[in-house]
Amino acid sequence: MTTPGGEVLTLAAGDYRATVVTVGAGLAGLTWRDRHVVVGHDPGELPVGYLGKTLVPWPNRVTGGRYEFAGEAHEVPVNEHETGAALHGLLCWVAWDVASAAEDEVTLSTELAPRYGYPFWLRSTVTYRLDAATGLTVSITSTNLGDAPAPYGASSHPYLSCDLAPVDECTLTAPGARVLEVDERLAPVGLRDVAGDLDLREPRPLGGRRVDHAYTGLPEGGWTVTLEHPGTPFRARMHADAPWVQVYSGEKVDRRGVAVEPMTCPPDAFNSGTDLVVLTPGEAHTLTLRIDAVPTA
């Protein structure tokens, strides 16, 4: 089936169902026992808030759309003029190819050709795999096909949800011990220890709390973010081992879900160099994350 979101692929395993679209190698839906574990979208509609998209070759933002790498200055298109930033890489709206597909697994692939602003050559693949016991595993792999080192970062942009219950009624747990402070343009200005409304290390009711911050200081060996609602019979969870995670309270999706984006590097890493992946020629990098639903009754 082809839509404005590209080809639509449906996966099934046990109580889980997932919908994947080829445009942006996106996750358009994930349910458990017919209840929403993420905020989904109609593949025929343009999704708001980058719902489920794959973020390559950088996550989050490049401030001003400008950066320097290996002594050369580069400019990438600014697509959020309110903040003057280049958001979420270059592949969100590209139609990826279906490399393989089965009842419970699909792999999408594309090449990112060299271009003004990002003169590097990558092949990227995204695999979505459903398992009846462990939920949905997502693996994002990129390989440098060029003959020069390439700056790189990756993430995915799902919104955890407790069957679309208002997040104001939910409890959120996110284990980051440090948070990246930003200015009025959402450009990074420095790290600090979490405190007050941004300390989510213990389960906390979201209420009217607004969050749109990158966290680090995460547990070594892997971490979990959990969203729970008293009237929903499961907890929605994200598991990953990335050094950063962006948490966003979902105003663009009417606060029916919380964006949880495992990131290989922080916002504006193309300028700061913090945790920036540099892919040498022929080198590959993989980010893996997992989303599941845990029964509460």
Image (cartoon, grey):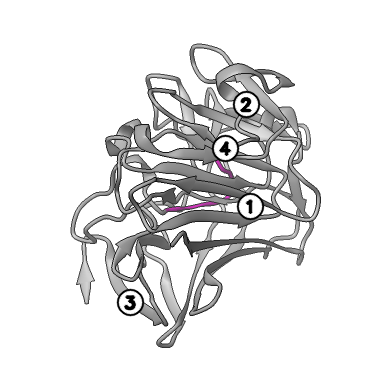
Disc nearer the start of the sequence (2/1): 1
Give residue 203's mark: 4
Q: Position of residue 281 (x, y in %)?
A: 77, 61
The CA span between labels 3 and 4 is 33 Å
Whether residue 139 is visible:
yes
The amino acid beneath tag 2 is Asp
Vertical order, 212 against 7 (above or below): above
* x 36%, y 67%: residue: 22
The amino acid beneath tag 3 is Thr
Specify start and end residues of the magenta stretch as a single range.
Answer: 53-59
Q: Position of residue 181 (x, y in %)?
A: 63, 18
The CA span between labels 2 and 1 is 38 Å
Tell whether 144 sits left or right of 6. Answer: right
Binning the other alpha carbons within 10 Å of mark 3 as few (below 14), some (14 to 19) or many (20 upward) gives: some
Whether residue 89 is visible:
no
Q: Quadrant of the N terminus?
A: bottom left
From the image, tell me which residue sits under label 1.
120
* x 53%, y 58%: residue: 112
Give residue 199's mark: 2
